[in-house]
Amino acid sequence: MTAPARALAAAPRRRRRQDRAGYLFLLPWFGGLLFMIVPFFASLYLAFTEYDLLTPPRWAGLDNFREMLGDALLHQSLKVTFIYTLVSVPLSLAVALGVAIVLDRGVRGLAVYRSVYYLPSLLGGSVAIVMLWRYLFGYDGIVNDALAWFGITGPAWTTDPDYALSTLILLHVWTFGAPMVIFLAGLRQIPAMYYEASAMDGASKWRQFRSITLPLLSPIIFFNLVQSLIASFQTFTQGYVLSNGSGGPADSTLFYNLYLYQKGFAEFDMGYASSMAWLLLMIIAGFTAINFLTARFWVFYDN
Amino acid sequence: MDDRHDGPRLDRRRLLGLAGLTGLAATLPACSRGFGGKGGDDGKIELNMVWWGDAQRAELTQKALDMFQAAHPGIRVRTEYQDSSPYKDKLAARFAAGDPPDLMAMRFDSLREYADRGTLLDLTPHPEMNQSGLTSSARALGTVGDKSFGVPSGLNTIGFIVDKGLTDKFGVAIPDGNTWSWDDFAAFAQQVTKASGGKVYGASIDAWTVANLLVFARQRGEDFFTADGRLGATAATVTAWYQLVADLRKAGGVPPAGFIDQNNGTSPAQSYLAKKSIASQIIPTNNLLGYNQACGGNLQLLRVPGETQGPRRGQSIDTPALWSIAASSRHPAEAVTLLNFLINDTEAAKVAGVTRGVPASRTVAETITSGLEPDNKRSSEFLAALQKEKLPESYPYPVGASKLTNILKTLTTEVEFGRMSPADAGKQFIAEAQKAIAP
């Protein structure tokens, strides 16, 4: 057998071995799946029942979904979640891309910067950070103290219903590290020759960004967008910690999942909470579907 | 092309798969059970007892439980505790999972949520649970209809604490706490703010706390919740409550909008009083010791204003928490034995002190009062003095009442920032509250 022929014969074997390794890495996830299947179908059933946690569920048909139409707090929670998502996702992705491009230029000590920027996204959803945020942005917190130096009277960032959600959006944008690291990896994959060739043709930096970086990065942008949207619709911790579970001030941080939690565990209305979970699943599925459908018009695959 | 550099390209199919997987995994509901572990293998009966509180309360509780276990070698008590707000959610989850604790601390405003659904043991047919030391109003706290679903773990009421260190510094006299009116209180609060040059505000009224509004409603002759579990307060009363706070804010007696964070928590150390940004506030009396330690040791304990001016008294004898037993407990007899011990054993009460309020049994309370530290003694005597007077009774809150806190919180903010008038907020509160507690 000639050398190239041997290599050809070995390829499928190697692929099979790779596949096996892949499944091995997926194993914990499949293990976890087992624990999800039962609650998954249980919640589907409960969505059509009246269930107070303490007595057996009673079949209620579509009552829960009908009740949603007139539930002002549900509408408020949808409003909060949509505003939060539609503002914070594009903002944080833009910041992540911007910082990734700067870092990709070859900054000395890249690894340090990368870690420093990545850190907040590990901590951003944690209770401690939201608590810290509360102190920073408190009525007489550090932020307002700093503003006072410049003669500015800062608002009550976390207790004024007009500002509380913006403060949380700021917190979200601050956690741009996770998409940034993915952007960085994506930027590294764009062959330098494209830039060299276009530079020779006299293309400006902006032109290079628009005609080379953006199209070649579009699959990564797409991935980050889908990920961030899903995560953002499911925001819970930030609202819970900032308002101690109440969604306040004046329901201005009543995220959808926070309201769901209140319904299920504080108000003993688990049937309604389950139907809310399924509505959220449909909303997220809808947004993700729109993403995939429009992707063909703006996502460019290099192969 | 070099295979290695080509690497795992993100192509359409991979992306689709990835996004699909993460999406699916992310939207699946999470599931968690209560603590596992059932019984030991040494033949002892194991009781699970849960409650909320802090490490200090845990230490005191454990001392009492050690005494119980020494006296009842056949029973082991496995106890768990946590902070009050996660406790509430976890308790519901444990019932839902079919794994309720045997003995549990029960929030006063949640008793009927559980009792009305048949999940709690009726103590009436269990004479081993001796409630003869309790006054009828103390017993009423755990009574629904003619059944007894909980025994107060202790008794408390609310009181106004004033930082005398601050008022002395600014030369403001503290009014007579037994007779002061709401006008006296307003004048006092404004004086403090003025005398301090705006550095310290006279008071904060937690207008969103149902227990505070409840006392105010009683003073106006209304039962906030009626004995048969309905809403008895009127929109006019809620409006007057909001108006009182709004006027006081305008006059400078309480801090400006946004200053007080409703969700600051209940820890005395982190309170605005301990930070010296306000000079007075309402607290549950069993917390006097904690607040006095956090505030420098010069707190005065006053009654709620308006007790002698209205058509009737507002203050009542309440409980920070009830003890209840699960109806499905596998060891109801032993659980009752433990509960009876916690309520009636004088030695246990001596070590446990008044962390959960003044012992519900009067005989026990009288025995231990003399041995208490000064602050606890003071709050106990404050309560004892009230107990001797004719006060309205407290009834278990109706089902759905736990929703009222959030409603009150939201409307308080709306009024605070001038987004809603007190009159509109009063009307809306009644409308929403009636919906929340409708059967």
Image: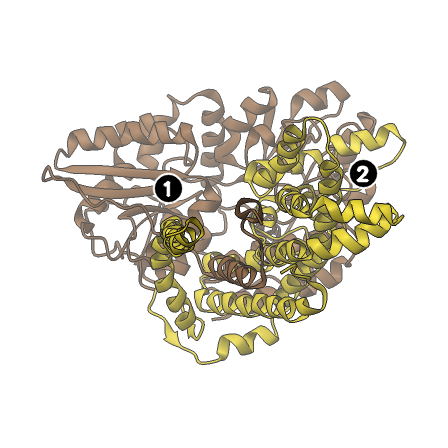
Chain colours: A yellow, B brown
Name the amino acid type tagged 2: Gly
Tag 1 subunit: B
Name the amino acid type tagged 1: Trp
How many angstroms separate mark 1 from mark 2 (CA)? 40 Å
Q: Is residue B281 visible?
A: yes
> Residue beneath label 1, please?
B51
Mark 1 residue element? strand
In the rendered view, does B133 fall on the left or right side of A149? left
Residue A298 image point, x, y percent: 72, 64
- In front here: B13 or A174? B13
- In front here: B424 or B86? B86
Residue B35 image point, x, y percent: 31, 45
In the rendered view, does B45 fall on the left or right side of B63? left
Residue B216 image point, x, y percent: 62, 50
- In front here: A44 or B323? A44
> Residue beneath label 2, please?
B252
Mark 2 residue element? loop
Q: Is label 1 or label 2 in front?
A: 1
Residue B47 image point, x, y percent: 22, 43
Q: Residue furthest front?
A: A2
Q: Earlier in the sequence, mark 1 or mark 2?
A: 1
